[in-house]
Image: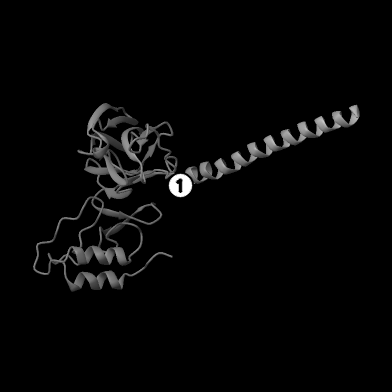
Amino acid sequence: MKNIGGDNRKILIRSFLLSFLGLAVALLLIKAPQKIEKRASAPEGTVSFDPSWGNFFPDQDFLISLKLNSGNWQISGVDFTLFFDASKIQIIDISPQQNVLPEVVLKEIKADRARFVFVNPGGDSSLPHGEFVVAKITARGKSQGVAEITFSESYEVSKKQIADEGYNLSVTNVKEAKGSYTFTLGGETPTPSAGPTSSVACGQNGDLNNDGKVDEVDLMIVILSWSPNGPVPTPPPGFCQADVDNNQKVDEGDIGIVLLNWRPGI
């Protein structure tokens, strides 16, 4: 009888342990999908330059917008550092986009890098989210050639949701995002391979946005600049004027030249 009682106790203890372990595993399985689902649904951020490329003259000032896409997360502050080739390009100023992250905590521009910290000290209702302009960069070409602006991998973007504590947004493309700007003399258009410059004046080969091809984008530039009675609208930085045939107006003749030079990319 003693052996039977001892065996029963062992069976009871073993059953209790198995039941407890089964309950613990069940709780983990119930919670795990919630954690995975929450992690998978959390949006990741991206950054970009606008324009991300362009053709400019040395000593020409131009404006670059730095954009952030935070998805559904509200953003209360950013801390970015930019690197660039000081022999080709100069950063004149970095200013915050008003009503987005308007307060400047730090702005430090050196020869080959620039760091800025902008914040929004307002309440939840004023914090931006989605895609928005974080900063306006005033740049200037220094010499002929191609200059790139890139992000440092050391950055902070403070995110939050209403009633949540703030923490850091993961910017997924911070290593790859860059701006690439070509500086040439006399308005010459660089070839698609960025080799020696072409002797064709800017836009006269139908390539109005300097991307090395003539397609729907160039046609749309002509349509948006339509002025059959003149004067010719001033193009934005990095673009050629839509008066391709140089007759001081933008009309059917310019569309014809774009179509005759049609060479869309693959």
Q: Quadrant of the N terminus?
A: top right
In terms of depth relative to the viewer, which is nearer, 41 or 150? 41
Q: Is residue 10 above or below residue 250?
A: above
The residue at the point 33 percent across, 49 percent down is: 53
In terms of depth relative to the viewer, which is nearer, 75 or 256? 75
- The reply, left or right, for residue 255 in relation to residue 159 is left
- The reply, left or right, for residue 125 in relation to residue 72 is left
Q: Amino acid at mark 1?
A: Ser
The quadrant where residue 66 appears: top left
In terms of depth relative to the viewer, which is nearer, 125 or 266? 125
Regarding residue 84, the answer to whether it shows in the image is: no
The quadrant where residue 13 appears: top right
Q: Position of residue 6 (x, y in %)?
A: 85, 28
The residue at the point 25 percent across, 65 percent down is: 220
Q: Position of residue 86 (x, y in %)?
A: 33, 33
Q: Is residue 22 above or below residue 212?
A: above
Q: What residue is pinned by disc 1?
A: 41
Q: Position of residue 11 (x, y in %)?
A: 80, 34
The residue at the point 42 percent across, 40 percent down is: 171
The residue at the point 22 percent across, 34 percent down is: 102
Q: Quadrant of the C terminus?
A: bottom left
Q: Position of residue 71 (x, y in %)?
A: 36, 46
- The reply, left or right, for residue 188 in relation to residue 28 is left
Assign a secondary structure to mark 1: helix
Q: Give neighbour class at mark 1: few <14, some 14-19, many 20+ (Cα, 10 Å).
A: few
